């Protein structure tokens, strides 16, 4: 049995979080985390942007501690960038004012990307092998709970996911044969009026 690895996280302050609310920056950071280091030119091609815009967004991500230059690659003209952390943690439960607004803006930007990712997963489902189709799930569960019971449930599920992530290879590194990135998105919330 392999020893679980440490998962690096960033808990951004309000200013850093504001910088991350831009949807292009969220996508860039995600690509650097999942696929590993890249140049502004490669990211621009991947995202359909020009390299000047991409360089600007990369500098903003670096300024706020999300990414850093990968000094072991490239040249002065051809800079490579890498993610500094595997995950971003945002706690809006006790935030107020600007911190709450920035946290919600980031959540909205991340949610837009997650919805697009789920849509692509549905569109590509028929192309998956039977074993990957069997490993996939698109479910929702609604149940009456108190706030304490809901928090306990979310914490149990989160602990299981952190444990699985710590036991898995690091994203961005070469993966063993048969292993591919697998996404679990957890959205837990009190039900809103379904008629609206």
Image (cartoon, rainbow, N blue to C red):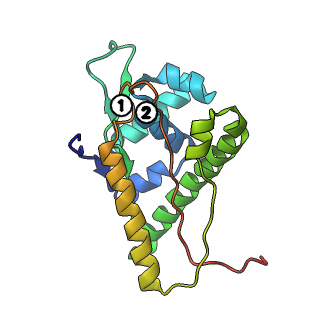
Q: Is residue 93 visible?
A: no
- Quadrant location of residue 90? bottom left
Residue 133 lies, in percent from the top left, at 62, 41
Residue drawn at point x = 37 percent, y = 27 percent? 81
Q: Is residue 55 left or right of residue 10?
A: right
Q: CA distance from mark 2 to mark 1?
A: 6 Å
Q: Residues within 10 Å of mark 2 (few under 14, many from 20)?
A: many
Mark 1 secondary-structure assignment: strand
Q: Are marks 2 and 1 in contact (CB under 8 Å)?
A: yes
Mark 1: give few (<14), some (14-19) or many (20+) Cα within 10 Å.
many
Q: Where does the image place residue 145, in percent across and percent down from the top left?
A: 52, 84
The residue beneath circle 1 is: 82
**For the view shown, which residue lies furthest in the bottom direction?**
146
Instruction: From the top left corner, tell me how far across and down residue 193 is, in percent.
Output: 71, 80
Residue nearest the observer in this picture, 104 or 176: 176
72 shown above or below 97: above
Label drawn at residue 174? none
Picture quarter with the N terminus: top left
Q: Which residue matches tag 2?
A: 32
């Amino acid at each position: 049995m392999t020893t679980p690895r440490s998962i690096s996280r960033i808990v951004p302050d309000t200013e850093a979080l504001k910088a991350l609310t831009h949807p292009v920056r969220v996508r860039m950071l995600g690509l650097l985390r999942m696929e590993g280091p890249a140049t502004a030119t490669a990211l621009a091609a991947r995202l359909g942007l020009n390299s000047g815009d991409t360089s600007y967004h990369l500098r903003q991500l670096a300024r706020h501690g999300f990414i850093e230059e990968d000094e072991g690659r490239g040249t002065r003209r051809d800079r490579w960038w890498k993610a500094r952390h595997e995950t971003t943690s945002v706690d809006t439960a006790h935030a107020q004012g600007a911190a709450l607004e920035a946290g919600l803006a980031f959540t909205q930007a991340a949610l837009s990307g997650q919805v697009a990712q789920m849509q692509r997963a549905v569109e590509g489902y028929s192309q998956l092998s039977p074993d990957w189709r069997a490993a996939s799930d698109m479910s929702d569960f609604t149940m009456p709970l108190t706030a304490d019971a809901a928090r306990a449930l979310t914490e149990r599920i989160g602990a299981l996911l952190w444990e699985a992530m710590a036991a898995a290879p690091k994203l961005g590194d070469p993966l063993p044969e048969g292993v591919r990135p697998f996404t679990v998105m957890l959205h837990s919330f009190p039900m809103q009026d379904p008629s609206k």
